[in-house]
Image: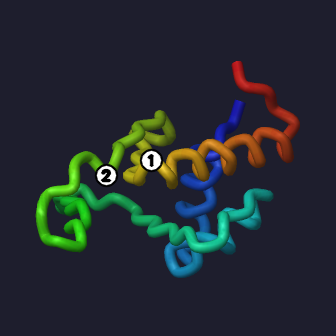
Amino acid sequence: MTDLEQALTALAWGDPAVLQDPAAAMSKLGVDVPNGMRLDVRVQRRDTLYLVIPPASPDGEPGGVVNQMDLWRSGDQFVWILSQDAKLALLGMREQFRGRTGQDEQ
């Protein structure tokens, strides 16, 4: 069974334009990105350490947990880093992908 992460990984490996317009790449996979949501797709480099810094709250004080890291097996590893609201959107996008590819969750 191919999942959304595997399909996106294969598409990114074969088409460098995915990095320039990830929403268009998702559209090629039959998935609509919700309005107002941005995607930042990166192909990991072996010589790079990636640090994702959470946003500051409006008053500059720590605002609690705002991001989650979601690991999925795809290639060596696929990582989503997202807010709770974006997690709900991601689950919807996964459902769209499964529905359009005729696959049920196992």
In the rendered image, the residue lying farthest to the left is 61
Within the image, what quadrant is residue 50 found in?
Answer: bottom left
The quarter in which the C terminus is drawn is top right
**Front residue of 89 and 95:** 89
Secondary-structure class at tag 1: helix
Horizontal and vertical percent for residue 10?
60, 53
Element at badge 2? loop
| Amino acid residing under circle 1 | Gln
* Residue 52 position within the rendered picture, expressed as x and y whole percent measured from the top left: 24, 60
50 left or right of 66?
left
Mark number, residue 10: none
Which is nearer the eye, 81 or 89? 89
Label annotation for residue 84 = 1
Which residue extends farthest top?
A: 106
Vertical arrangement, residue 95 with respect to residue 50, above or below: above
Residue ID at (33%, 50%): 67
Identify the coloring.
Answer: rainbow
Query: Could you say where residue 5 lies in the image, as x and y percent from the top left?
Result: 57, 46
Q: CA distance from mark 1 to mark 2?
A: 7 Å
Residue under label 2: 66
- Name which residue lies at 41% across and 40% down: 70
Are circles 1 and 2 on residues that touch, CB within 8 Å? yes
x, y (%) of residue 26? 67, 63
User: Is 60 positioned to the left or the right of 5 in the image?
Assistant: left
